[in-house]
């Protein structure tokens, strides 16, 4: 069922410079060439009946309900498959057409249940609508014949062999074949929109029916539960379970997904303050009406019983929690921060902002740190993911952001994916990328693991550079070596656009024989011929685009690799137009935004250094306070300082550092050394177990604000229900600032955005009004680009001339040896999100109920490990236990796991190593040994005890109050 | 490169891992012979059926993997064409004509007799594994109806008695 708020024009829009004018039912209509008669009619507000057509999918022409008459044409052409022509005269309604359409409907209805009144699609069913539209009054064939509707043959007791029972295996939607009209919209949605091709029409004629994979249940099939088929289905055959349980929504509100950096736009379909379902917004600029299983379905966490909605405090983490009023909680936190600053100095406190929160919320937290704490001790979780992107791209191109829009991929001839797993991490963008690949673009994947994109139905990478973890820079240097020494440099581009002195230095550097693929193959493990072929392919097409993820940044040379990527793009002239570019795939929904908002200890909003007197002066004037020009502490420095006894108070906004940051035991030791930790979150997360003040947060459904996605696109988040805690997150921060003695008086998040716009040159033109009007805007948005900037560096680089930087490969100090012979690398999967605080509290557990360790069959055999065995994973930092999964997706010598479940303790094993420039942790390379074991690790036992104790303290708090 | 990709064992369970080895080899040979032809899926399916007499359901995943298609796509094609059988046929396949010309000279009665005497419906195989009964629409033998075909041999003017004789021969 499509959104209740959207109008279906029947067939997709066509782009053409040429307009065609035709007459439909006496009305003159002008549309781009290639448009269907059906769409042209819909644009003129004429509704032609239809069943198999929908404007999200290409026309199919199977239902024959959309017949029209066209002057000079024989018979009754289907309007969905007939393109417009100049001067065409179309009749959409007359007696003959009505008769034909009624005939078609009669056939459909004779094999369809007549339980409209109790059907979940009631009120929003296209079959029902069409029966009404064509004026169906009787069904001459009766309902007793051969059918798919009745469990038993009508009139007889025997089973009807055509009847197939409901499939309820998917946790979010049901498939009821008795209502299916075999329009194949679902099959086409899975093919065209999602690109998984999990559905087919099985059999032919009256036998045909929809089948998931080989007549499997949806859950067992190839389906990845994106929901596109559910949205495409015109009947109740595929329906959200939430709609079945609750009924139709009555209003809808546009908002933005709070999971990944794709930033899909959704219509939250509501009944009062209750959410009925999420439907991706057809007009969404990032997703064009598509979504993944997380954004569409995994929202149950927002109303999960684990949510804490009352503020709580305690003096020591061994004390039970005490529920208190907001005022008491804020007053306690403020007095503690003041006491600590009085006792240990101004720099002894700080804050960590969250990439999950809105721009406005992040902005007020960094403002609180700078203006109320009076230091620059603010950092963000982007530190642990994309800080090298910000640094590396700023140094080379001049701006800390990706260069393109997502749609740009549709013009790419070669797509290079490095250290990213789009089908799992950025699923909606992956679907778009797959669409382009199926049109013929070539694919190069550089990843230690054989990610799905390497080979998946209809997609096959031209080259999979299966490098050893930690050797990215060696690989990119080899590719650059081939480009430079084989004459693939785009000399014109480099001469016109780049800084030549830096280019010459770089050219000499990468030409050195020691960087050649042959010299490097023993380091990277990738055959030289393969590297050469990939480099030639990349450099020889008009448009080559690079997409990369955390497999690039989360290394000791993360920043170096980002620069290496920028160098390669510049040298081959692949920046500044559609189809090319350097595209970081941001992990979290608002990584880009939280970085833009000044969440770094050295940068004010808009990436201006705190020591920059002009920038700081502007903030001082607006904020009416003196600001520190001294760079503050980064997250790892905060932990160090805490262990040294110099850092005692921390305000953590919606982030779970105790689970997500590397070397968990080090993190928890630091947290335990602090005297006041304030955690603002939805749940008692791992970090909150070390906290003294808990401020209940609000989900994205409960707030107004903006998120900025991986394409710098600022989209609105809209409040569809009141905050469960009664207080919005920005309000809580504001209360805390006021209690600390620094006045803040915003009455609405839009005022915060207005202040951001005043103070940040790249945001000067941004306002809630403008976003509401345009749907979304991509920064820079200012006087020079009032409607935003989809493509960056078009005529010149933001920094003027593009700068090449020499990228020497330095092997990580994290080395394998006899004791730790395997390399562990980490990643994530489609159905879970990051630390899993949300997705673990949804039905997505059906797909991933535990983290497993992937190990190559050879490595497993040597260790006597078989599928499903418990294995201990030991690194220099710690050890944990999880179950093994044997697969050759990973190369021999490499093991891989996700970190979605706290008990797996994947980050107990990761180490303190980090990027040289930005301290982004080296999650992707840890030397480990794997052994078969029969019991949990020591850490897991301690974790479980501590965790159980903290849960008890929480329960104690609740009882405490109910007794009162 | 293509070759290198093909050798990999994908995620567990291995596609077609449940196939008996001789069937697995037959499927792989069919794939090898036809992979690079246009319309390779139909060619592969025909080749598999020629070798094994049917397309085993467990072969779908293997064929899908080898041709880089989804299992659903392969299933859609196998189920669309009546020519593909998904269960092991009997030692002999008996195609019985149901088209008009034969109908007009008693094919319906013959069909009823066939089903009753064999104890199977169309597409079924007799319990002793001797005969599989399949419908067919015109064998081009209209002048000599009712017609049927036993394996590759065409027979005309089939009466119930002659039918029984054929069956007895097949069982012999
Ligand atoms: S939910 Fe998505 S992947 Fe699953 S069958 Fe439907 S369209 Fe395909
Ligand atoms: S399930 Fe829905 S979309 Fe799919 S064929 Fe049936 S009616 Fe059409
Ligand atoms: S792709 Fe990302 S933004 Fe889009 S629905 Fe999925 S999780 Fe949300
Ligand atoms: S809508 Fe045109 S044929 Fe179905
Ligand atoms: S109708 Fe039976 S052979 Fe032609």
Image (cartoon, coloured by chain):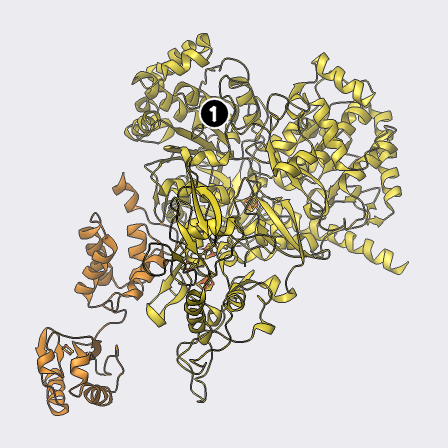
Chain colours: A yellow, B orange
Provide residue A299's location: percent of width, then percent of height: 63, 52
**Residue sitting at x 42%, y 49%:** A36
Q: Is residue A918 above or below residue A961?
A: above
Q: Nearer the viewer, residue B27 or A150?
A: A150
Q: Is residue A688 left or right of residue A522?
A: right
Q: To which chain does the residue with label 1 belong?
A: A
Instruction: Quickly name the residue at label 1.
Output: A561
Q: Is residue A196 visible?
A: no
Furthest residue toward right: A964
Q: Is residue A201 above or below residue B140?
A: above
Q: Is residue A116 above or below residue A501?
A: below
Query: Regarding ligand 5, which quadrant of the image does it lie in?
Result: bottom left
Q: Nearer the viewer, residue A196 or A209?
A: A209
Provide residue A730's location: percent of width, then percent of height: 77, 38
Q: Is residue A501 left or right of residue A755?
A: left
- State the count of labels: 1
Furthest residue toward bottom: B161
Beta carbon at label 1 within 8 Å of ligand 3: no
Provide residue A743's location: percent of width, then percent of height: 86, 29
**Residue sitting at x 24%, y 79%:** B125
* The N terminus of chain A: image quadrant: bottom right
């Amino acid at each position: 069922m499509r959104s209740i708020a959207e109008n279906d024009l029947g067939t997709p829009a066509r782009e053409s410079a040429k307009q065609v004018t035709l007459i439909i039912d006496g009305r003159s209509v002008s549309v781009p060439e290639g448009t269907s008669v059906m769409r042209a009619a819909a644009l003129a507000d004429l509704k032609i009946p239809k069943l198999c057509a929908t404007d999200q999918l290409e026309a199919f022409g199977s239902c024959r309900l959309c017949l029209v008459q066209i002057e000079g044409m024989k018979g009754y052409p289907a309007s969905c498959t007939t393109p417009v022509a100049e001067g065409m005269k179309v009749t959409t309604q007359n007696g003959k057409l009505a008769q034909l359409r009624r005939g078609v409907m009669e056939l459909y209805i004779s094999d369809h249940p007549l339980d409209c009144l109790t059907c979940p699609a009631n009120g929003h069913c296209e079959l029902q609508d069409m029966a009404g539209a064509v004026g169906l009054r009787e069904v001459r064939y009766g309902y007793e014949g051969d059918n798919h509707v009745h469990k038993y043959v009508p009139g007889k007791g025997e089973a009807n062999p055509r009847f197939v029972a409901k499939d309820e295996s998917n946790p979010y939607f049901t498939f009821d074949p008795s209502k299916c009209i075999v329009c194949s919209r679902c099959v086409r949605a899975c093919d065209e929109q999602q690109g998984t091709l999990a559905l087919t029409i099985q059999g032919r004629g009256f036998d045909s029916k929809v089948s998931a994979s080989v007549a499997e249940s949806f859950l067992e099939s190839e389906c990845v539960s994106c929901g596109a088929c559910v949205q495409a289905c015109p009947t109740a055959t595929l329906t959200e379970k939430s709609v079945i349980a609750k009924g139709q929504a009555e209003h809808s509100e546009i908002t933005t997904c709070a999971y990944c950096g794709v930033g899909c736009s959704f219509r939250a379909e509501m009944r009062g303050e209750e959410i009925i379902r999420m439907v991706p917004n057809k007009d969404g600029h990032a997703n064009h009406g598509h979504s993944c299983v997380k954004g569409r379905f995994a929202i149950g966490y927002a109303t999960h019983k684990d949510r804490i909605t009352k503020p709580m405090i305690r003096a020591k983490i061994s004390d039970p929690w005490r529920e208190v009023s907001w005022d008491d909680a804020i007053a306690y936190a403020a007095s503690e921060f003041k006491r600590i600053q009085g006792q240990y100095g101004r720099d002894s406190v700080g804050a960590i902002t969250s990439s999950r929160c809105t721009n406005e919320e992040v902005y007020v937290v960094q403002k609180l740190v700078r203006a109320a704490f009076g230091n620059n001790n603010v950092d963000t979780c982007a530190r642990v993911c994309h800080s090298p992107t910000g640094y590396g791209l700023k140094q080379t191109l001049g701006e800390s952001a990706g260069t393109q829009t997502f749609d740009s991929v549709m013009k790419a001839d070669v797509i290079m994916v490095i250290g990213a797993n789009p089908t799992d991490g950025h699923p909606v963008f992956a679907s778009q990328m797959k669409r382009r690949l199926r049109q013929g673009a070539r694919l190069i994947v550089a990843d230690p693991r054989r990610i799905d994109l390497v080979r998946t139905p209809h997609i096959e990478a031209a080259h999979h550079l299966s490098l050893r973890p930690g050797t990215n820079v060696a690989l990119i240097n080899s590719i650059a070596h081939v480009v430079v020494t084989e004459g693939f440099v785009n000399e014109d581009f480099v001469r016109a656009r780049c800084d030549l002195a830096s280019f010459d230095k770089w050219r000499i550097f990468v030409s050195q024989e020691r960087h050649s693929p042959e010299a490097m193959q023993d380091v990277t493990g990738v055959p030289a011929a393969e590297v050469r072929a990939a480099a030639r392919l990349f450099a020889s097409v008009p448009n080559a685009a690079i997409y990369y993820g955390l497999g690039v940044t989360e290394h000791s040379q993360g920043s170096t690799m980002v620069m290496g990527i920028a160098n390669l793009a510049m040298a081959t002239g692949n920046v500044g137009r559609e189809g090319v570019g350097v595209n970081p795939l941001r992990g979290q929904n608002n990584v880009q935004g939280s970085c833009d908002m000044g969440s770094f200890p050295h940068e004010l909003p808009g990436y201006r250094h705190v020591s920059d007197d002009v920038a700081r002066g502007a903030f001082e004037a607006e904020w009416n306070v003196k600001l520190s020009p001294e760079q503050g502490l980064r997250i790892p420095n905060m932990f160090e300082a805490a262990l040294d006894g110099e850092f005692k108070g921390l305000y953590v906004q919606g982030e779970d550092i105790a689970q997500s940051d590397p070397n968990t035991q080090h993190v928890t030791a630091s947290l335990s050394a602090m005297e006041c930790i304030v955690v603002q979150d939805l749940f008692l997360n791992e970090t909150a177990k070390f906290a003294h003040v808990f401020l209940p947060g609000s989900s994205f459904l409960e707030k107004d604000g903006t998120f900025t996605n991986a394409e710098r696109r600022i989209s609105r988040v809209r409040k569809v229900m009141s905050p469960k805690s009664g207080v919005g997150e920005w309000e809580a921060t504001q209360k805390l600032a006021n209690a600390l003695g620094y006045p803040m008086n915003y009455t609405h998040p839009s005022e915060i955005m207005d202040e951001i716009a005043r103070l940040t040159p790249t945001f000067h033109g941004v306002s809630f009004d403008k976003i509401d009007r345009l749907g979304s805007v991509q920064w820079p948005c200012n006087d020079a680009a009032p409607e935003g900037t989809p493509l960056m560096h078009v005529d010149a680089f933001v920094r003027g001339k593009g700068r090449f930087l020499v990228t020497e490969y330095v092997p990580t100090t994290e080395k394998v040896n006899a004791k730790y012979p395997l390399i562990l690398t980490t990643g994530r999967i489609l159905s879970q999100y990051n630390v899993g605080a949300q997705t673990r509290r949804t039905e997505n557990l059906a797909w991933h109920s535990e983290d497993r360790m992937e190990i190559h069959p050879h490595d497993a055999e040597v260790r006597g490990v078989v599928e499903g065995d418990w294995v201990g994973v030991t690194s220099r930092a710690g050890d944990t236990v999880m179950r093994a999964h044997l697969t050759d997706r990973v190369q021999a010598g490499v093991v891989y796991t996700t970190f979605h479940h706290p008990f797996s303790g994947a980050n107990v094993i990761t180490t303190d190593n980090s990027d040289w420039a930005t301290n982004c942790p080296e999650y992707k390379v840890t030397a480990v040994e794997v052994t078969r074991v029969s019991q949990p690790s020591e850490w897991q036992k301690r974790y479980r005890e501590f965790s159980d104790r903290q849960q008890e303290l929480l329960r104690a708090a609740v009882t405490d109050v109910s007794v009162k | 490169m293509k070759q290198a990709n093909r050798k990999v064992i994908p995620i567990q369970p291995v596609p077609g891992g449940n196939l008996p080895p001789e069937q697995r080899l037959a499927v792989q040979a069919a794939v090898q012979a036809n992979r690079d032809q246009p319309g390779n899926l139909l060619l592969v399916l025909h080749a598999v059926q020629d070798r094994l007499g049917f397309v085993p359901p467990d072969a779908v995943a293997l064929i899908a993997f080898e041709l880089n298609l989804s299992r659903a796509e392969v299933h859609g094609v196998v189920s669309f064409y009546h020519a593909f059988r998904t269960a092991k046929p009997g030692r002999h396949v008996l195609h019985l004509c149901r088209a008009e010309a034969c109908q007009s000279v008693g094919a319906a009665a013959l069909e009823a007799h066939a089903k009753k005497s064999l104890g199977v419906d169309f597409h079924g195989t007799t319990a002793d594994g001797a005969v599989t009964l399949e419908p067919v629409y015109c064998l081009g033998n209209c002048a000599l109806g009712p017609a049927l075909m036993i394996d590759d041999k065409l027979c005309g003017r089939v009466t119930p008695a002659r039918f029984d004789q054929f069956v007895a021969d097949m069982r012999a």
